[in-house]
Image (tube, rainbow, N blue to C red):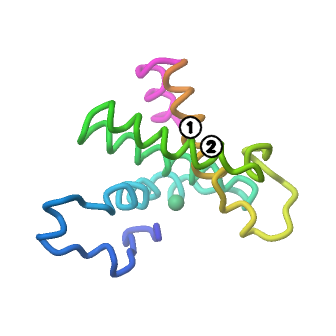
Amino acid sequence: MENTTATLHGSDILQKPGQLIDENTWEDTIAHELFHHWFGDLVTAESWSNLTVNESFANYSEYLWNEYKYGKDQADYHLMTDVNQYIHNPSDFNKNLVRFNYESREDVFDLVTYQKGGGILNMLRNYLGDDAFFAGINDY
Ligand SMILES: [Zn+2]
């Protein structure tokens, strides 16, 4: 949870040194929650309809972390896994990214708000180029 100044994680995130030799399975979650300090805490959605403003950027931070630490191939693999989750869920595939009509706020916590939004940000980055994309994020 991305509380301002104090990101909270479940106890599962505490891995022993022996576990970390194989893999830190929580790196994506850590990157995601820390990114919310900007998108989610400082830049906050007006309503649940705009939750994707927070979550798509936090989702895309997982790509950025993987690209920084492990390289573009690992980041692209992470993105492909995310997009595949979204694409192969028929109930989500036809939903708009921003939805103003929903039964419960929980309805917008889905693969569209997170994975589709992160995928769209990556598409924009590829379309605009890094200079324009990151300058835009900086302005935003
Ligand atoms: Zn989040």
Q: Which residues lie in the magenta part? A: 128-140
Q: Where is the C terminus found, in terms of image quarters?
A: top right
The residue beneath circle 2 is 116
Q: Amino acid at mark 1?
A: Gly
Q: Main secondary structure of the magenta part?
A: helix
Tell whether circle 2 marks a residue whose Cβ is less than 8 angstroms from ligand 1.
no
Give x and y (percent) for residue 59. 50, 49
Horizontal relation, residue 18 to residue 101: left or right: left
Q: Along the line of sight, which residue is nearer the eye, 133 or 71?
A: 71
Residue at x 65%, y 42% (from the top left corner):
87
Question: Compared to 68, does 61 lie above or below?
Answer: below
Give x and y (percent) for residue 90. 75, 49
Horizontal relation, residue 14 to residue 20: left or right: right
Question: Compared to 131, does 100 lie above or below?
Answer: below
| Rendering quarter of residue 27 | bottom left
* Label 2, label 1: how far apart the Cα atoms are: 5 Å
